[in-house]
Each structure stands twice: as C-alpha cells, then as structure tokens.
Amino acid sequence: MINMPTSSSLSQWPRRPARWRRWAAHPALHRVLGHIAPEASGRLAQHLVLWPNTTAPATWELPALQMAQPVTFRFGQRALRWGDSGPVVLAMHGWEGRPSQFAALLPALLAAGRQVIAPYGPEHQPGHRGFAHVLVFRQFLLEAAAELRGVESVIGHSMGGAAALLALRDGLSAERVLTLAAPSALAHSLLRSARGLSLTPRAHRRFRRLVDERVGLPARQIDVAPQVAGLPVPAMLVHDHDDGVVPVSEARRLRAALPNARLLLTRGLRHGRVLTD
C-alpha cells in the first residue's frame, strides 16, 4: 500500500448527475420507450444501475477529507486512511457513495485506537467511468484485506454491506462486521429499480438479460442471505424502518441467515442518514 500526497481539490468530482442520467431515469420516458423500443429502454436501465454516478462530497464530509491520508493499493485501487496504527477497520461505502461518508463514525473509532481504511469502490474514484456491481466490490475487499494482512472489523453501507458479507464468506478474515442498510439479494434491488423506472414487461426482460450478461451470472444467483447462511462472524445489522431504497425486510432476511447477528432498527434516518446520525 502506497501513501499518496493529500489533495484538498474537489475539482475532479462532478457537481450533479450527467445530463443523460437525468432524462434516462424519468419513468415517463420508459413508459413510452418500453413499447416502441424495449431494447433501448432496457439498455438505459442497465446503465443506470451498473454505471455509477459519483458526485462531490457533502459539506459535512469535508473535515474528514482534510484529515485523510490517500493511499493506493498495489492493484491500483485507491482508499482514504485515518489513523496511523492500531487494528484495521475496513469500511466499504455503498453504490455511488464515497469513503468520506463514514466521517461520523471516525471520532469513536480513532478514539478507540483503530485505524480506518475506506476504499473507493470500483469505478467510484473521481474521474473514473465504467461498470461495477456487488461482485467486483466483493473482489476488491478480498484483495484489499490480503494486502493489509490483518483486518479486525469490516463496515459496509448499502451495497458495501452486501459485498462485505460475501467477502467474509469467501475468505476475508475479520472478528466482526457492521452493515448499514444492506440489501440481501441483487434480484430484489433490480426489481425495485425496474418498478421505479416503470419499465414495461419487454423492457424489464431485456434489462435483466443485459445485467446478467454484464455481471457474468444470473442475478437470482446473487442471493446474499442464503449464501452467507451460517456465517459465524459476529454481525451488527443496522437498518431504518423508513428506508425507501432498501426495505427493512432485507435486513430481517440477513438476520435470519446469520447465527451471530444482532439487528438494530432505527426510525426516521432513511437510507443515507443512518450513516450520519
């Protein structure tokens, strides 16, 4: 792992979603396009769910960014690091997230003598453009943990939480895991996206085929809950009753699958504020 110079410039971050995303995500477009050109509707939907749109950090993240030490792993992926010594906490943000979104957790972790290493997810670095999904997030965590040679705890928000559980199943060694608003199955997430976009049945079928091709296997096979069933690592699952992105039923599925898991339910924090409260 190589230390990099700290930069306070935010110029590489886009300030708002690309214009094509704004119109491509409009349900009215898909209600029409799905009937006259379902291939195009399905392809746009695939790009929306597998091509991350990264935006500039929020104001509350800036102090953490100024404290961070940028590092680069041998395989080229970058991360932010807080703390110089102590047991490692590996923190993985969610879809279209950023390492600095863990800012609210840093004071307690650093006071407890931990160092926090939060990677940029694949294709989530400023200036990067490309496809990503939960399996490449999982692979990144496995590679990062192998280079760190010792991870005490893993934290994951949203898709980062699902990726963390899959990585633990596949050999990442840690004493405990904390997930925040984690989904339990890729197929469930895709169905929610299709409904939100108002995809027609034909466009939906094309969308699912395109996603399966890009991921490399059918989405229905990436069902996290049964795949991590029996995982002995102590887990804390935090989820909000009012989460409109990943419903609380997803957390209950994970809790039923993990023998040493505790489920902490909150109210009023929704999907993102569960990271900041």
Image: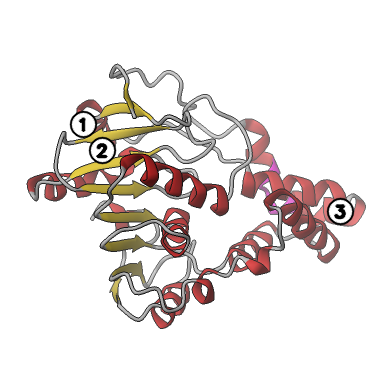
Q: Quadrant of residue 168?
A: bottom left
Distance between mark 3 and mark 2 Cα atoms: 41 Å
Counting from the top left corner in percent of width and height, residue 23 is at: 68, 40
Counting from the top left corner in percent of width and height, residue 211 is at: 72, 54
Please name the residue shown 40% across and 42% down the image. Answer: 144
Please name the residue shown 42% across and 65% down the image. Answer: 243
Say which element carries label 1: helix
Counting from the top left corner in percent of width and height, residue 103 is at: 24, 42
Counting from the top left corner in percent of width and height, residue 86 is at: 14, 44
Mark 3 residue crowding within 10 angstroms, few (<14) / some (14–19) / many (20+): many
Mark 2 residue crowding within 10 angstroms, few (<14) / some (14–19) / many (20+): few
Instruction: Look at the image and tell me in which quarter the C terminus lies.
Output: bottom left
Please name the residue shown 28% across and 46% down the image. Answer: 102
Say which element carries label 2: helix
Instruction: Look at the image and tell me in which quarter the N terminus lies.
Output: top left
Residue closest to the eye, 120 or 51? 120
Give the amino acid type for the residue marked by disc 2 in the picture: Trp
Q: Which residues are magenta?
A: 24-28
Could you tell me what secondary structure mostly forms the magenta stretch?
helix
Q: Is residue 175 left or right of residue 18?
A: left
The residue at which mark 1 appears reads as 63
Residue closest to the eye, 48 or 108? 108
The residue at which mark 2 appears reads as 60
Say which element carries label 3: helix
